[in-house]
Image (cartoon, rainbow, N blue to C red):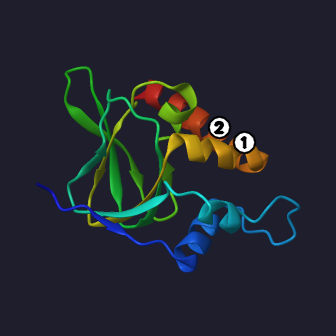
Amino acid sequence: MTDIRKLSMGPVELEWLSDALGLSSPMSETPSLEGVLSSMSSIELHIYPAEFEIIREGDQGSDFFIVKTGSLSVLRRDSMGRPAQIGQLGIKDFFGEISFLLHSPRSATVKTDSECGIFRLSAAEFAKILGKYPELDRKIKQLALERLGRLFIH
């Protein structure tokens, strides 16, 4: 059994997450993202070991992930069914948005290259965040479109 550790979330982690999502503006008229995040019970911070598949191509799932520490590889099966690296993720990158937005199976496998700290947000709670922050919603949709475009090129 692989050791995945769940860490406790405090104000420092919530502030980091708010900054990573790009919504730390104190002048915003919407509620502070840190306040919104702290009220959500299903946001978790996990430590995954190296060589761990966090999501697997073809699997069902709609949770959203943000990288706090470490690096990850994005893999997709080629025409022969072999995994081929199509991308790399690092600190403040996120993944899982395509399945979240399209309610479809995972479009790629994301595997840790090193030990990684990853925030995991349930789809339901992430949808609440996007409903309150239209600029984040636009950012996530734009990235999903770009990534979908690259999937068809590979």
Residue 34 occupies quadrant:
bottom right
Instruction: Report whether 48 appears left or right of 39.
Output: left
Which residue is painted at 52% across and 62% down in the image?
Answer: 92
131 or 99, which is in the foreground? 131
Residue extending farthest bottom: 12
Secondary element type, mark 2? helix
Does 106 appear above or below 34?
Answer: above
Please tell me in which quadrant of the rendered image residue 106 appears.
top left
Q: At numbered mark 1, what does the secondary structure look like: helix, strand or loop?
A: helix
Q: Is residue 118 above or below residue 63?
A: below
Is 130 on the left-hand or right-hand side of 65?
right
Looking at the rendering, in which quadrant would you find the N terminus? bottom left
Amino acid carrying label 1: it is: Arg
| Image mark for residue 141 | 2
Residue 153 in percent (x, y) is at 45, 27
Asked if residue 79 is positioned above or below residue 142 in the image, the reply reads: above
Residue at (27%, 26%) from the top-left corner?
78
What residue is pinned by disc 1? Answer: 138
Amino acid type at mark 2: Lys
Kindly indicate whether the residue at mark 1 contacts the one at mark 2 (C-beta within 8 angstroms): yes
Residue 44 x/y as whole percent: 44, 60
- Residue 83, horizontal then vertical, whole percent: 23, 35
